[in-house]
Amino acid sequence: MLVANSIEEVRKIISAQKKAGKRIGFVPTMGYLHEGHLSLVEISKKHTDFQVMSIFVNKIQFNDKKDFENYPRETERDLKLAESAGVELVFLPDDEEMYRDRLTYVDVLTLTDHLCGAFREGHFRGVFTVVSKLFNIVQPDVSVFGQKDIQQAAGIEKMVYDLNFPVRIIIAPTIREKEGLAMSSRNKHLSPEQRNRALAIHRSLQAAESMIESGEAGASVILQKMKQIIEEGKPDKVDYVSITSYDTLQPVDRIENKSVIAIAAFFGTTRLIDNMIIDKGDKGFKCIY
Ligand code: AMP
């Protein structure tokens, strides 16, 4: 596995691979890898020939300085995991390499009005900016993102469409711990007791699924039940429990078309997010989470 710290090195390696006719798959990450990240590489391998991963804790997407400082970092372990997953090139830049000047940003409007966008000022602008830069550096044919960060994935799909990036975006399923907690690098900060309480998030999604399967479509009825279940986990703060349209990420009163149910809540000082996509199947709505 190759490890490149500079943009120039990445460009050279990618250009040689492209000349050899290889299709480039790309998984951007902030490291502290877990099975969720590695599942994205697995999917990327099915569509491309040369796997690139970036590991970069992107300062400009953190609206909370402490969160940035405490973000878990373990590069040696990450490199071993990436190699065992079949990654062929890791791009591991430092801040200086990525942000010499910082006058240009990329943003996606309206899709970021609600959900995390309403609570984390500047976060998505930081994400879309770094992903644009990474796409221009790596020039992937395919890039895979996790459903766990649904607003991020939807925003990147929109950005790629609006700005004509020549890359196909794939949104991959959320990988969970056995008990249902969505895997996240930030889970490291949860005490066993907080982790246990946080399972209420997954239980609330299961309850929503049962209600939707039995024909309930009213957002307020579903949300009321979900909030009650989340409260049973005694969250330290709930940012939102919302039902939105999938295409616009704007709140809806009823589930009529493809929709998203999304949650953000703090357990201790750790902010957890999770979501479910509700899609129309042949026999009514299908819940994916
Ligand atoms: P991060 O390192 O948290 O920035 O995440 C890098 C990529 O991994 C993003 O596309 C995330 O959506 C994705 N990801 C994070 N957690 C999971 C998970 N539990 N299952 C699937 N993908 C995930």
Image (tube, helix red, strand yellow):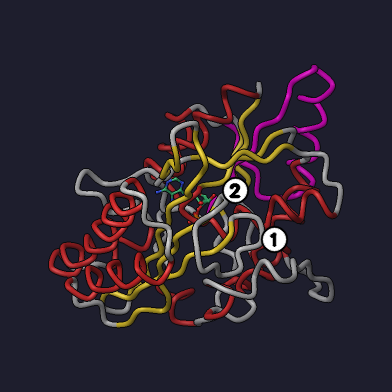
Say above or below: 25 vs 193.
above
Element on which disc 1 rests? helix
Say above or below: 181 vs 264.
above
Q: Position of residue 276 (x, y in %)?
A: 43, 52
Residue 28's disc number: 2
Along the line of sight, the residue nearer the viewer: 281 or 83:
281
Q: Quadrant of the N terminus?
A: top right
Q: Quadrant of residue 252?
A: bottom right
The amino acid pointed to by label 2 is Pro
- Identified at 35% across, 68% down, the residue is 221
- Identified at 46% across, 53% down, the residue is 148
Residue at the outermost top position:
20
C-alpha distance separating marks 1 and 2: 10 Å
Q: Which residues are magenta?
A: 1-29
Q: Quadrant of residue 4?
A: top right
Q: Disc count in the image?
A: 2
- Identified at 16% across, 62% down, the residue is 196
Along the line of sight, the residue nearer the viewer: 157 or 20:
157
Task: Specify which label sits upstream in the sequence, 1 or 2.
Answer: 2
Horizontal placement of 95 versus 162: left or right? left
